[in-house]
Image: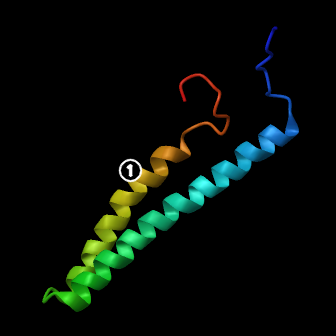
Amino acid sequence: MDADFDDTNKPELQAHEQTYHAFSVFMRWSMVLLAVALTSLTLWFATSAGFWAGLIAGIVLFVLGYCFVIRHEEHQPLNLWTEGR
């Protein structure tokens, strides 16, 4: 029994990969923005650091989250079966 694993021409597989990619992008942005909001609001309201410390920490966390979570994955190919993924 010879199994054929070359499914690159199936449109439903490509649609599934694109949907997964869109969901993955949504989740990455959600995680970064939720971390920024929680950190900023905690520093602003629950500590004596105040508004400016919360704002600065939120900006720093957003930049780090963008660089290490969002931008890193944007350079990955959409096709999950390509070499180097």
Residue 51 is at least partly visible in this image: no
Q: Is residue 4 above or below residue 81?
A: above
Tally of numbered tags: 1
Question: Badge 1 local density, few (<14 within 10 Å), some, or many (20+)?
Answer: few
Q: Would residue 49 appear left or right of 58 to someone viewing this image? A: left
Task: Point out the image quarter for the N terminus.
Answer: top right
Residue 6 is at least partly visible in this image: yes
Q: Is residue 85 above or below residue 59?
A: above
Q: Kindly indicate the quadrant of the structure image that contains residue 7.
A: top right
Where residue 84 appears, as percent x and y from the top left, is 53, 24
Identify the residue at the far front of this view. Answer: 1
Where residue 17 appears, as percent x and y from the top left, is 71, 43
Q: Would residue 49 appear left or right of 40 to someone viewing this image? A: left
| Residue positioned 26% across, 76% down in the render | 56
Q: Would residue 21 appear left or right of 32 to someone viewing this image? A: right
Where residue 30 appears, as percent x and y from the top left, is 50, 67
Of residue 77 and residue 9, the one placed in the foreground of this image is: 9
Q: Kindly indicate the quadrant of the structure image that contains residue 40.
A: bottom left
Where residue 62 appears, as percent x and y from the top left, is 37, 66
User: Residue tagged by mark 1?
Assistant: 68
| Residue positioned 39% across, 53% down in the render | 67
Amino acid identity at mark 1: Phe
Task: Point out the image quarter for the C terminus.
Answer: top right
Of residue 3 and residue 57, the one placed in the foreground of this image is: 3
Label 1's element? helix
| Residue positioned 85% across, 29% down in the render | 9
Identify the residue at the far left of this view. Answer: 48
Q: Kindly indicate the quadrant of the structure image that contains residue 47.
A: bottom left
Q: Is residue 8 above or below residue 14?
A: above
